[in-house]
């Protein structure tokens, strides 16, 4: 008799699972198995995940799959329809959130920062950050910093050439470049990770390690147990987070003291050029302990948002351009035109000498960098188009989703249940012929230009930066840095792939190259 109850319960559950299966037979998407949904197919295709998603998107437009093991199922709805994106990212914004699941996985690392929060916590940070991001002091400081680091990378490559070690891992160098930049713009610290000696800084190492560990929690159902017993990677994470927190609290303390002493010496509020100081000045009223936690979260979230994204995009750009002489020629032609207008023929540049004298080369690159001001960067229409084309086919965030608070119906008629995750996939979207035409798979910067002038696309169609109220805050900064770096490098150097293997992406939240980008570099 006692055995009967669990038995009945079990058959009940099975029956339920079959009902869902019966429904799922008619659903658009991968084949679903009893109790497992599409989990096995998802697991077997993991190293070509984004192309697998693209295949279904191509077939169905909007499709669904249920992942997990019954009863811990989650229904995912993938869509490539701009009208659907507009609906859940903007029109019905309040019904969709990042999901408690995501907060929990990333909590120790990201805290309640802008990336890992919703509702009021998010709104306040968004407001404060947008206000600061539009500030001219900050923008000017950022440009200087992007220039300085772009030149530093160029000098590093020049040294490599001089010492005949001209095979370099550009992914690694770009990662160091953007890390140094984000730390300087974000909190006024020169990290100096970009240097020939390739130093490993404890903060940078702890940051990377923590980032990887929180993303692997996703695949480890026992992570909480490991955390509880403080074993394995969870023990490592705890140490990393401690180091990060020590670093940030020392920094916040230092900036706080500086501001107090400088304001008393008559420094005006608007002169502080890093984001952290600006937040501190803006936020003087709050209790110090609260403010410290908020600022710590801000720093970490800011590094996450700005570093890998920009450096991965630069790697794809270099990869795509180095295989396409015609695209490269057009970029160079544009850069040459802008340079000539700037100097009006008064100055010689790289093409006029033989690169035998390193000091002279460095001076030329320096002079070229100095000419890259806001105006020069804004006039780079073709390079801008090339960057957008890169992000269309290789969006750094290849898919991103939101969870529904309440059930809803998308514009194309798809039903969303409470707790479902609605996912937009920029990688698949960039490959849809109904959105980009029959040449959707071709790399063609011209598609963004009309009479030589860049023409933006709707963010609901070109979704690499997301869209609506949570659209990427750093988009302009990212373009400034990418254009600055690409212009300096392409004008001075030629790049060739060091290997012939296909470049593949790594399965992660961002679309990094699985083996990095090894390049031979030489003077142009
Ligand atoms: C090519 C470079 C970049 C790409 C493709 C990119 C893409 C994105 C995407 C897809 C999101 C939405 C993420 C989500 O909510 O799940 C986002 C958010 C964000 N990005 Fe970027 N990003 C880039 C560079 C940057 C840079 C350089 C910064 C900082 C200077 C930055 C700051 C942010 C911030 C603060 C958010 C959170 C906005 C919010 O939730 O309200 N991003 N970005
Ligand atoms: C190149 O650098 C990237 C990014 O740091 C790394 O993932 C990759 O393994 C490196 N490649 C090689 C061959 O060392
Ligand atoms: C932002 C700024 O200019 N800070 C200055 C405050 O004062 C210290 C020395 O007292 C300077 O080193 C900082 O540059």
Image: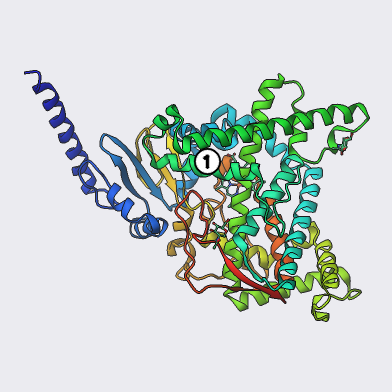
| Colour mapping | rainbow
Q: Quadrant of ligand 3?
A: top right
Residue 117 visible to an observer of this rendering: no
Measured as percent of width and height from the top left, residue 294 is found at: 65, 28
Q: What residue does disc 1 label? A: 90
Kindly identify the residue that appears in the image at 71 percent across and 67 percent down: 157
Kindly identify the residue that appears in the image at 44 percent across and 57 percent down: 428
Say which element carries label 1.
helix
Whether disc 1's CB lies below 8 Å from ligand 1 is answered no
Kindly identify the residue that appears in the image at 71 percent across and 68 percent down: 160
111 shown above or below 468: above
Measured as percent of width and height from the top left, residue 338 is found at: 79, 69
Left or right: 134 as drawn, with respect to 79 = right
Kindly identify the residue that appears in the image at 66 percent across and 31 percent down: 246
Measured as percent of width and height from the top left, residue 469 is found at: 58, 40
In depth, the one of 145 and 23 nearer the eye is: 145
Measured as percent of width and height from the top left, residue 387 is found at: 62, 62
365 shown above or below 290: below
In depth, the one of 90 and 355 nearer the eye is: 355
């Amino acid at each position: 008799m006692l055995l009967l109850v669990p038995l009945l319960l079990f058959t009940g559950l099975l029956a339920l699972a079959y009902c869902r299966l019966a429904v799922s037979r008619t659903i658009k998407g991968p084949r679903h198995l009893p109790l497992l949904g599409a989990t096995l197919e998802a697991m077997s295709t993991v190293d070509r995940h984004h192309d697998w998603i693209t295949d279904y998107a191509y077939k169905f437009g909007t499709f669904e799959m249920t992942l997990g093991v019954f009863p811990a199922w989650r229904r995912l709805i993938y869509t490539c329809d701009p009208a659907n994106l507009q609906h859940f990212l903007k029109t019905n914004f309040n019904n969709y959130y990042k999901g408690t699941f995501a907060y929990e996985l990333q909590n120790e690392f990201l805290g309640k920062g802008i990336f890992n929060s919703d509702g009021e916590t998010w709104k306040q940070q968004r407001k404060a950050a947008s206000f600061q991001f539009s500030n001219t002091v900050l923008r000017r400081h950022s440009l200087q910093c992007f220039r300085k680091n772009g030149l530093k990378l160029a000098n590093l490559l020049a040294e490599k050439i001089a010492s005949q070690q001209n095979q370099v891992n550009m992914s690694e160098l770009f990662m160091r470049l953007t890390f140094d930049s984000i730390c300087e713009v974000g909190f006024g610290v020169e990290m100096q990770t970009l240097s020939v000696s390739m130093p490993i800084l404890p903060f940078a190492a702890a940051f990377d390690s923590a980032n990887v560990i929180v993303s692997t929690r996703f695949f480890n159902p026992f992570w909480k147990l490991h955390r509880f017993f403080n074993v394995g990677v969870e023990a490592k994470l705890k140490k990393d987070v401690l180091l990060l927190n020590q670093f940030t609290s020392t920094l916040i303390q230092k900036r706080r003291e500086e501001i107090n002493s400088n304001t008393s010496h008559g420094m005006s509020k608007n002169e502080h050029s890093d984001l952290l100081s600006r937040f501190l000045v803006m936020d003087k009223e709050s209790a110090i302990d609260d403010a410290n936690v908020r600022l710590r979260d801000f720093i970490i979230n800011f590094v996450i948002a700005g570093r890998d994204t920009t450096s991965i995009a630069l790697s794809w750009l270099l990869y795509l351009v180095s295989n396409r002489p015609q695209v490269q020629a057009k970029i160079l032609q544009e850069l040459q035109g802008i340079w000539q207008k700037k100097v009006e023929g008064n100055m010689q540049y790289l093409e006029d000498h033989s690169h035998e004298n390193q000091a002279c080369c460095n001076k030329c690159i320096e002079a070229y960098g100095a000419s890259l001001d806001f105006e020069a960067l804004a006039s780079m229409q073709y390079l801008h188009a090339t960057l957008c084309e890169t992000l269309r086919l290789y969006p750094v965030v290849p898919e991103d989703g939101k969870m529904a608070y309440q059930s809803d119906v998308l514009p194309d008629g798809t039903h969303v249940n409470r707790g479902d995750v609605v996912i937009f996939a920029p990688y698949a979207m960039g490959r849809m012929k109904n959105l980009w035409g029959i040449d959707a798979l071709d790399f063609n910067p011209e598609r963004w230009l009309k009479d030589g002038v860049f023409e933006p696309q709707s963010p609901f169609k070109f979704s690499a930066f997301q869209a609506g109220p949570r659209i990427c805050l750093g988009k302009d900064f990212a373009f400034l840095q990418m254009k600055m770096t690409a212009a300096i490098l392409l004008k001075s150097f030629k790049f060739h792939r060091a290997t012939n293997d296909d470049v593949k992406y790594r399965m992660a939240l961002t679309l990094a190259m699985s083996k990095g980008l090894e390049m031979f570099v030489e003077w142009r």
